[in-house]
Amino acid sequence: MTHIDTLIDRLLQEQPVTEAINLSFANCTIRVQSDSSTLITQLRRYYEPFVTSVDHPEIIITALERPEVDLKLTYQPKAPEPNKPKIKEEYVDLPGGRVVRKRLTGMHFIFGGGRHLTIGPCVANDNQVINFINNRFMAWKLRQGCLLYHAAAVATHGRGVALSGFSGMGKSTLALKIMSLGADFVSNDRLMVQGTGPTRTMFGVPKLPRINPGTILNNPNLLQLLTPEEQQRFSALSRDELWKLEHKYDAYISQCFGPGRFHLQAEMQGLIVLNWQRSSQPLQIRRVDLDRRQDLMPAFMKSVGLFFGADPEEFTLEAPAEHYLAQLVKLPVIELTGGVDFGQAAEWVWRTMQSGNWSALT
């Protein structure tokens, strides 16, 4: 079988890189290099708050622009997630690493042994390149001992909370609502947390929130994402119609909330689990004991997935439940139940973040 280094070297010889951008994610510098100036321009806009002149990267990622390529490999399909029967990805493990292929776009992602390359129609699928960049950063943090959470996060003055919840509960909507009250943004959907003692540090992922029209209409900071015609059209829909609408917009944090509001690192004060329902019941906020409420753990535990585990040192990145319990011991864990109320929840979280008085809940 072809070694991962041999495959990467062959592809680089065929198509040399000409452009590069350096990104600073918390304490990690990443250089993305490409043969496409268009792709680098797209990445520069997306990652605008994190572009840096520092050129001593911990990670180097190469993105080669090309029509779909046949690497002459035999792939194994990745089992789809529950309730999503369509197979979207396939992969093959080679000596030294892994190749992942996206079936719909023909994009290939090749990584292992500290090397990272993507090849295919990158410009048309820059969202997949962005996800690859972010995944490489997450793998780097997990190798440093972080646990991966399915959570958003906000902070103020370097201290913040993680916002988790079962599918469709509105983590991003709540995070952006708290931002409108003055908080900074840390992460949208993935969070790495390090430490088990009195201080735990959470590291965000530089992924912009993808939000629906209902979230935008109910947050004045976000209205600029819609044209006047879209505002009028979406405002005419019922609450139920808005809730079910699958139409997403990227929320550029600097554009909507001003510069300097996206920070990828903060001390973790608490974990909030959204477990509410769309009903007329009042919002209930209570502190819970995870040892007794382990039914809540699937809301924030996150599998590392296909883009991790290719290197021998990554085989142990999948953390068991007891590691999460150990990390969260004595940390305030708050469950939100009853009816969905983003306004009331945001105000309570913001007040409590400012005061740090989590002991008021029992």
Image (spheres, grey):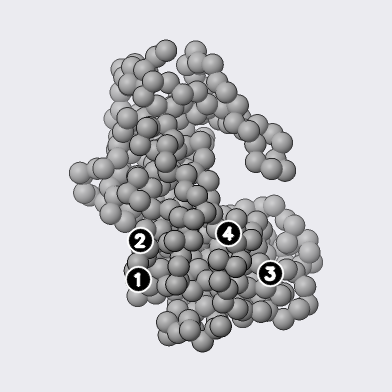
* Relative side of 239 to 286, left or right: right
Report the quarter where the C terminus lies.
bottom right
Q: Report the residue at 50% width, 50% height from top.
A: 320
Q: Is residue 317 above or below residue 50?
A: above
Question: Circle 1 is placed at which residue position?
Answer: 198
- Label pair 4/1, CB-CB below 8 angstroms: no
Residue 191: x and y in percent read 45, 56
Question: Circle 4 is placed at which residue position?
Answer: 297
Q: Is residue 193 above or below residue 271?
A: above
Q: Report the residue at 68% width, 79% height from top.
A: 283
Question: Circle 3 is placed at which residue position?
Answer: 276
Q: Which sits earlier in the primary sequence, circle 4 or circle 1?
A: 1
Disc 3 packing (10 Å; few <14; some 14–19; many ≥20): many
The type of residue carrying mark 4 is: Met
- Label pair 3/4, CB-CB below 8 angstroms: no
Q: Mark 4 to mark 2: distance in Å?
A: 18 Å
Q: Which sits earlier in the primary sequence, circle 3 or circle 4?
A: 3
The type of residue carrying mark 2 is: Gly
- Label pair 2/3, CB-CB below 8 angstroms: no
Q: Nearer the viewer, residue 148 or 29?
A: 148
Q: Report the residue at 60% width, 26% height from top.
A: 77
Q: Is residue 62 above or below residue 94?
A: below
Q: Nearer the viewer, residue 307 or 236?
A: 307
Q: Quick check: can you spot residue 356?
A: yes
Disc 2 packing (10 Å; few <14; some 14–19; many ≥20): some
Q: Mark 3 to mark 4: distance in Å?
A: 15 Å
Question: Circle 2 is placed at which residue position?
Answer: 195
- Label pair 3/1, CB-CB below 8 angstroms: no
